């Protein structure tokens, strides 16, 4: 069997291998939200200051975002299996270290390492899906991945609340990290046996270290003022944004130069010649800017404004988590038939659900809000599942397999930047209204309306793409810079997304 045949032949254990990837993805994404409900426990049990609590949350997001693109490219070049297992092992050890941390300083350090490890794992998952699956099976696999993304993000507050309620305030925060250990160890052992040992796509290519430096500096300068928006009260922090634009512009110019000289770039800029990738990445960035902020706002409002416990706060978002899993499963099956129409419907459902929560805050504030918001959150969750899963499939379906890791890193970097930007913008609206008027109910409503506004921008992008496809359908195969044939093109027979 030739190397190319070995690379594209279906692996009989591919669904079990997908389970390994999803388990690792679940714990890494769970840690983006599970810590939010543990902050009071951190303050009580470890004496963590406001600044430390901020870095426990934002430091993870920062290093997660910084690692994604270089980690994806490393997996493309040196092998996704090796990169995945190293990242998973590092994440598990860092989780143990976080739980055993004896001081706030050590906790922040281990949390930064944990975020880096999560960034190493994440792009390998999308790359391995591209590598192991083809056709309609690939869409189904991305559908399951979308389920995990939605459930892990939404379930974080619930899992954290259950742990803190069971263990107690003093040590509950430690178990927020210890919960990763059995899953991480089991996934690592299973990964050694199940993950494919296929040859890497770019084993002889030189790694673009200067590109990593430029991109990392640019993403750092972009994300730092966003994740620290509430802690750095002065306006000087926004001076980093033009610095970020300069660095990212220099990165773009450097990557074009690398391609012109025939060298392997960190990010193949020809990916952006694919309308499906470019529009999908923009929709993902914008949607995560609106979607992630909902759980940030809800945790603040329910616990600080209404006096809910961590467990009660987590239970309140359970309808969203369950519905998101259902929506992603449905979306994964229907995306091949309906394509971008499914994303438009999903985004509309999310906006409608959040508007329902705004109405619930007005009509049933206080202890009854959890019941009053259950149906709107159910609608929003179904919409979210039908957005994340199909959009991921449509964004990556025509990406060459040998660039799948880097492309997945770009997509997820956009999600992390979008999440940080959304929390900064919506959080500013919430806290500004709270400071000026003192009404948590109204502040929550204005914050949710800001989230809806951001999601409507994503909806407008999806509608524009849908209309453009009807007028000017994208070719089934990508352009020459991305590959020489259909299989390498990432659009194997069977995947024909709708308009």
Image (cartoon, rainbow, N blue to C red):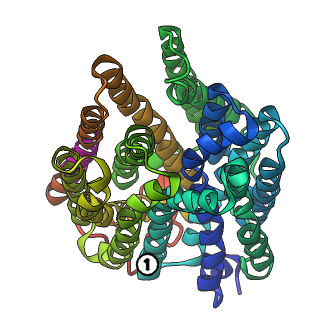
Q: Residues within 10 Å of mark 1 (few under 14, many from 20)?
A: many
| Image quadrant where one finds the C terminus | bottom left
On the question of residue 288 being in view, the answer is yes
- Front one among 263 and 447: 447
Location of residue 251 in the rendering, given as x and y in whole percent from the top left corner: 58, 29
Q: Is residue 222 left or right of residue 353?
A: right
Q: Is residue 387 left or right of residue 24?
A: left
Location of residue 128 in the rendering, given as x and y in whole percent from the top left corner: 62, 69
On the question of residue 74 being in view, the answer is no
Q: Start and end of the magenta stretch? A: 454-465
Number of marks in the rendered image: 1
User: Which residue corresponds to the image point at 68% horizontal and 39% vertical from the top-left?
Assistant: 44
User: Which residue corresponds to the image point at 23% horizontal and 46% vertical from the top-left?
Assistant: 361
Determine which quarter of the picture holds residue 436. top left
Above or below, comparing residue 52 to residue 352 in the picture: above
* Residue 460 counted in the magenta span: yes
Location of residue 261 in the rendering, given as x and y in whole percent from the top left corner: 64, 36
Above or below, comparing residue 331 to residue 250 in the picture: below
User: Which residue corresponds to the image point at 57% horizontal and 53% vertical from the top-left?
Assistant: 34
Disc 1 marks which residue? Answer: 140
User: Which residue corresponds to the image point at 65% horizontal and 79% vertical from the top-left?
Assistant: 17
Determine which quarter of the picture holds residue 207. top right
Q: Is disc 1 placed on a helix, strand or loop?
A: helix
- Front one among 18 and 147: 147
Location of residue 411 in the rendering, given as x and y in whole percent from the top left corner: 49, 50
* Residue 360 counted in the magenta span: no
- Front one among 171 and 469: 171
């Amino acid at each position: 069997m030739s190397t190319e045949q070995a690379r594209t032949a279906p692996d009989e254990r591919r669904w079990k291998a997908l389970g390994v990837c999803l388990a690792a993805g679940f714990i890494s994404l769970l840690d983006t939200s599970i810590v939010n409900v543990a902050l009071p426990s951190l303050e009580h049990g470890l004496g963590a200051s406001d600044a430390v609590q901020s870095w426990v949350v934002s430091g993870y997001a920062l290093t997660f975002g910084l690692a994604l693109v270089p980690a994806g490219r490393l997996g493309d070049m040196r092998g996704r299996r090796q990169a995945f297992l190293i990242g998973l092992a590092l994440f598990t050890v860092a989780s143990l270290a976080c739980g055993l941390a004896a001081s706030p300083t050590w906790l922040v350090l281990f949390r930064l390492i944990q975020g880096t490890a999560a960034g190493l794992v994440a792009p390998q998952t999308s790359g391995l899906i591209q590598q192991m699956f083809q056709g309609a099976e690939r869409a189904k696999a991305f559908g399951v991945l979308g389920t995990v993304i939605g459930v892990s993000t939404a379930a974080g507050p619930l899992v954290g609340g259950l742990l803190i309620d069971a263990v107690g305030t003093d040590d509950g925060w430690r178990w927020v990290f210890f919960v990763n250990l059995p899953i991480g160890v089991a996934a690592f052992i299973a990964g050694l046996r199940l993950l494919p040992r296929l040859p890497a796509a770019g084993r002889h290519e030189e790694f673009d270290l200067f590109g990593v430096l430029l991109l990392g500096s640019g993403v750092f300068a972009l994300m730092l003022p966003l994740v620290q928006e509430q802690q750095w009260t002065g306006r000087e922090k926004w001076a980093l944004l033009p610095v970020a634009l300069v660095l990212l512009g220099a990165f773009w110019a450097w990557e074009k130069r690398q391609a012109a000289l025939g060298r392997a770039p960190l990010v193949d800029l020809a990916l952006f010649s694919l309308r499906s990738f470019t529009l999908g990445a923009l929709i993902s960035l914008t949607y995560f800017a609106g979607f992630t902020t909902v759980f940030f706002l809800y945790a603040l409002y329910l616990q600080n404004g209404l006096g809910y416990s961590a467990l009660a706060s987590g239970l309140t978002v359970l309808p969203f988590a369950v519905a998101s899993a259902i929506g992603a499963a449905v979306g994964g099956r229907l995306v091949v038939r309906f394509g971008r129409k499914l994303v438009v419907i999903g985004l509309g459902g999310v906006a409608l659900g959040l508007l329902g929560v705004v109405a619930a805050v007005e009509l049933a504030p206080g202890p009854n809000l959890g019941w009053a918001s259950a149906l709107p959150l159910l609608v929003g969750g179904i919409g979210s599942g039908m957005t994340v899963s199909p959009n991921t499939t449509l964004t990556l379906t025509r990406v060459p397999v040998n660039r799948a890791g880097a492309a997945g890193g770009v997509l997820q970097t956009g999600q992390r930047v979008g999440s940080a930007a959304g929390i900064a913008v919506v959080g500013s609206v919430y806290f500004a209204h709270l400071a000026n008027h003192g009404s948590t109910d109204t502040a929550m409503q204005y914050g949710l309306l800001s989230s809806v506004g951001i999601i409507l921008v994503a909806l407008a992008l999806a509608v524009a793409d849908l209309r453009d496809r009807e007028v000017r359908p994208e070719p089934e195969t990508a352009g020459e810079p991305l590959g020489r044939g259909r299989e390498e093109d990432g659009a194997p027979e069977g995947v024909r997304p709708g308009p």
